[in-house]
Image (cartoon, helix red, strand yellow):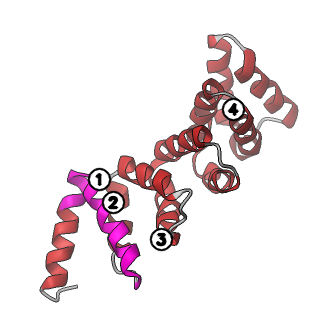
Amino acid sequence: MTDDTRIDELIADLRRGPLAVRRAATAELGASGEAAVGPIIAAMLDGDNDIRWYAARALVQIGDAAIAPLLAAMRAGEDRDFRRYAMATLTGIGEAAVEPLVGVIESADPDLQPFAAMALCKIGEPAVEPLLRLMQHPDPKTQERAALLLCKMGEPGVGPLTEALEAGRSGKR
């Protein structure tokens, strides 16, 4: 666990350190765990894309603990660059981010849906079953969004989508 003062120092290193210092700060922030999530997201929000890239790498290392705060920050702000880096972070976190991202698709959040869709497509296989479940949603538009995402996913999603549609047509599902 890294204390708040050290986290602030590491964030400062991300902002103005040479390459080797930024890389070391990224690794140490990533190892700092949940305590570093808020300050890292704050740096992403008010930093340039270079800082966002290093911050995103640190958040991927932290993993699960970064998901909810990252989605909350995406909802609260409108900076498209921040949202792109946040989406890349969620993609990097991978399977643990699938259910929260599917929740964004289900809620049809117009601001975040394109980012969530892109992340789910890039995550691939771990998102297939949750999207198949979403195809059973009572809202036809939600079903359509899930089917389109499975299709956009390519090989990992198209086969299961086809099977689900055939099973639905024959009454198996």
Up-down relation of residue 125 to residue 51 (above or below) = below
The Cα atoms of the two marked residues, 2 and 1, are separated by: 6 Å
Spatial CA span between label 4 and label 1:
32 Å
Query: What's the distance in space between the residues labelled 4 and 2, CA to CA?
Result: 33 Å
Residue 149, numbered circle = 2
The spot of residue 143 in percent (x, y) is: 35, 75
Q: Are marks 2 and 1 in contact (CB under 8 Å)?
A: yes
Q: Residue at x 71, y 30 (%)?
A: 47
Work out whether 109 lies above or below 20: below
Kind of residue at badge 3:
Glu
Please tell me whether mark 4 or mark 2 is closer to you in this view: 2
Q: Give the percent coordinates (x, y) of residue 133.
A: 36, 74
Of the two numbered discs 4 and 3 in the rendering, the one whose residue sits closer to the viewer: 3
Residue tagged by mark 4? 29
Determine crowd level at label 4: few under 14, some 14-19, many 20+ residues with C-alpha closer than 10 A: many
User: Which numbered tag is attached to residue 106?
Assistant: 3
Q: Are marks 4 and 3 in contact (CB under 8 Å)?
A: no
